[in-house]
Amino acid sequence: MEEVEILSEGLSRLGIAFDENHLTRLGLFLDEIEFWNSDSRRGKKGLSLVRADRATLITKHILDSLAGLPVIQRFPHATIADIGSGAGFPGIPFAIFLPGSRVTLVERSGRKAAFLRNAAARLGLANVEVMDNSVEQLSDTFDVVMFRALKRIETVVNHLLSITAPEGVIAAYKGKRSEVSAELGALSAYETEVWPLEVPFLKEERNLVLLRISSVS
C-alpha cells in the first residue's frame, strides 16, 4: 500500500475523521523527521530522532499515537502536555487533529526541542508550544498529561500529578496488559483505567492507562 493509503485506511479503522489537510500535515511531519534524522547541515550530525523507516513511522508511531485520540476525546480538555516529546509523539499528531486544544511539547533536549519548534512551524500548528524543560521545572498545569516513554508510571506519577489540573487526567501509552497490571500494582491509591488500543497494521499489544488526579485518596 502507498503511504497515503496506509494513513487513510489506518485513520478510518480508528474511527478518526480526516481530510486532505490532515494527510498533508502528517506527510510533512514524516518529511521533517527523516530530514532531521540525517541532517548534515553545517557539518552537524543527525538527531536520530526515531530509528525507523517511513512505513514503521506511520504504523508504530503516528497510528499508535492517534489510537489514543478517541479515548482522550471522551474527556473535556483545552490544554495537553506531551512529556518527553522527543520526535513529537503523540503531541504533534494530537495537535493536528485537535486544533482547538493547546498542545505543549515538553522536551529537555535543546536539539530535539529545536526540531519540534521547526516541525510545528513547518506544519503551521499555531496551537503548539515547545518547552525545553524537565517536568520538575514546569509550573503550568494541564488538563491532559501524556507520555509514551518507557518509564514505569510509579516513578513519574508524583511529578506528573503536580502539573495535572484538577479533574485532569494522566495518559500513559503502554504495551502488554500483563506488564501494565504489574505497574498498576504500585498505584493502588489511585483510580486507574486501562483502554486496549487496536493499532492498525501493528501486531504488538498496546494499552492506554488513564489516571485521574481527582481520584487520589
Image (cartoon, helix red, strand yellow):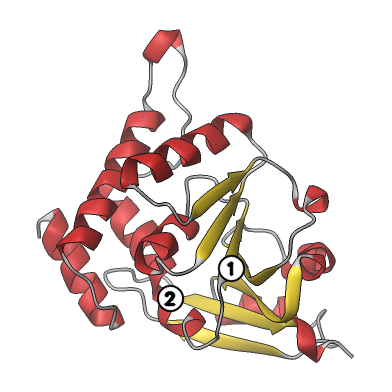
**Alpha-carbon neighbours of circle 1 within 10 Å: few (<14), some, or many (≥20)?**
some
Point out the residue furthest to the top here: 43
50, above or below 37, in the image: below
150, above or below 88, in the image: below
Lower sequence index among marks 1 and 2 = 2
Q: Amino acid at mark 2?
A: Leu
Q: Amino acid at mark 1?
A: Thr
Q: Which residue is mark 2?
A: 69
Say which quarter of the image contains residue 50: top left
Residue at the (36%, 25%) spot, across then down: 38
Classify residue 107 as left or right of residue 114.
right
Say which quarter of the image contains residue 107: top right
Residue at the (50%, 80%) spot, across then down: 72
**Alpha-carbon neighbours of circle 2 within 10 Å: few (<14), some, or many (≥20)?**
some
Q: Dividing the image into 4 quarters, which one contains the N terminus?
A: bottom left
Classify residue 168 as left or right of residue 69.
right
Q: Position of residue 205 (x, y in %)?
A: 45, 75
Find numbered disc 2 in the image and state the secondary structure of the residue it sits on: helix
Residue at the (33%, 52%) spot, across then down: 57
Q: Position of residue 129 (x, y in %)?
A: 55, 49
Q: Looking at the picture, tell me which residue is in the foreground, 11 or 168.
A: 168
Say which quarter of the image contains residue 142: bottom right
Classify residue 164 as left or right of residue 197.
right
Q: Position of residue 62 (x, y in %)?
A: 36, 60
125, above or below 201, in the image: above
Observer able to see residue 181: no
Observer able to see residue 26: yes
Mark 1 vs mark 2, CA separation in Å:
14 Å
Find numbered disc 1 in the image and state the secondary structure of the residue it sits on: strand
Q: Which residue is mark 1?
A: 79
Residue at the (63%, 89%) spot, across then down: 193
Q: Position of residue 172 (x, y in %)?
A: 61, 71
